[in-house]
Image: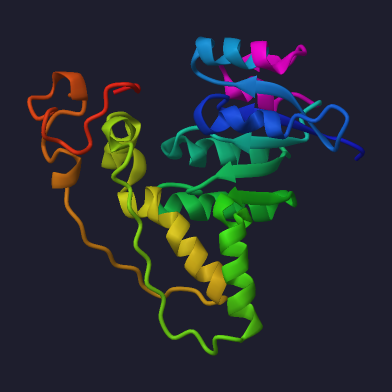
Amino acid sequence: MDQLRIGMIGVDGRGGLWHHWHQPKGRSVVVAGADVRQEALDGFVARHGGAPFVTLDYRELLARDDVDAVAVTSPDYCHEEHAVAALEAGKHLFCEKPLAITTEGCDRILEAWRASGKRMMVGFNMRYMNIFRCMWEIARSGVIGEIKAVWVRHFVGYGSDFYYHDWHATRENTTSLLLQKGSHDIDMIHWITGCYAKRVAAFGGLDYFGGEKPNDLTCPECSEKDTCVEAQFGGRR
């Protein structure tokens, strides 16, 4: 295979990074995109500069013979359906993290992968950041001795004024913040140390992100906008 032909399921948000894979003179080219939003597809076509196949139904993309691999960059709660379908259609798979939002969903994807004989990758992008690659090299060199414990602090406050006012805000769509954001940290612990956790626990609260206030409450309309350190008025919220 001289050039990998990629189809995107989800072309907005994280899927908007498809242009890094679209290298007509290189080893990969994005040939198709599927999304449930027509405006997202319109933007994809305009930015592509070619004539990619686009559809509102991802199944039409999976049925194409000119798609070798599929990148699933849809919302977390869609990963299981899209990833399993891609593998069963005989496509190589890149799936954004988290793999799925339930253990059962992850198992189902892994079973489909084993049966497919195809390659699969999960998008833990922090493995490719220089600071963490440096940590990996130091840990694996043995210069700091045997690692006995790892402590992680992950601040997610900045940007929560818009990030947690969409599908990210509901347990039905993400399971928890520990999975949605903390999966990066857990992956880094596993990767850097070469060990795997037997049990994971976390604690926290909803008060920082507005508690029981409605998710459609935005900064300009909030009565606490003049005192809240999170208040922003130049972005989406």
Residue 82 is drawn in which quadrant? top right
Q: Residue furthest left?
A: 223
Q: Give left or right: position of 155 versus 25.
A: left
Q: Residue at coordinates 56% horizontally, 49% vertically from top-left?
A: 109
Residue 218 at least partly seen: no
Q: Position of residue 43 (x, y in %)?
A: 58, 13
- Image quadrant containing the N terminus: top right
Residue in front for this viewpoint, 39 or 128: 128
Q: Position of residue 79 (x, y in %)?
A: 50, 39
Location of residue 64 with respect to 28 vertically, above or below: above
Residue in front for this viewpoint, 90 or 24: 24
Q: Residue at coordinates 51% horizontally, 47% vertically from top-left?
A: 97
Q: Residue furthest front?
A: 226
Residue in front for this viewpoint, 165 or 75: 165
Q: What range of the chain is rendered magenta?
A: 46-65
Residue 31 is drawn in which quadrant? top right
Q: Position of residue 147 (x, y in %)?
A: 49, 84
Residue in front for this viewpoint, 200 or 77: 200
Residue 120 at least partly seen: yes
- Image quadrant containing the C terminus: top left
Q: Is residue 172 found inside the magenta-colored segment of the image?
A: no
Residue 150 is drawn in which quadrant? bottom left
Q: Residue at coordinates 11% horizontally, 34% vertically from top-left?
A: 227
Q: Give left or right: position of 195 versus 29.
A: left
Q: Is residue 54 found inside the magenta-colored segment of the image?
A: yes
Q: Residue furthest bottom?
A: 145
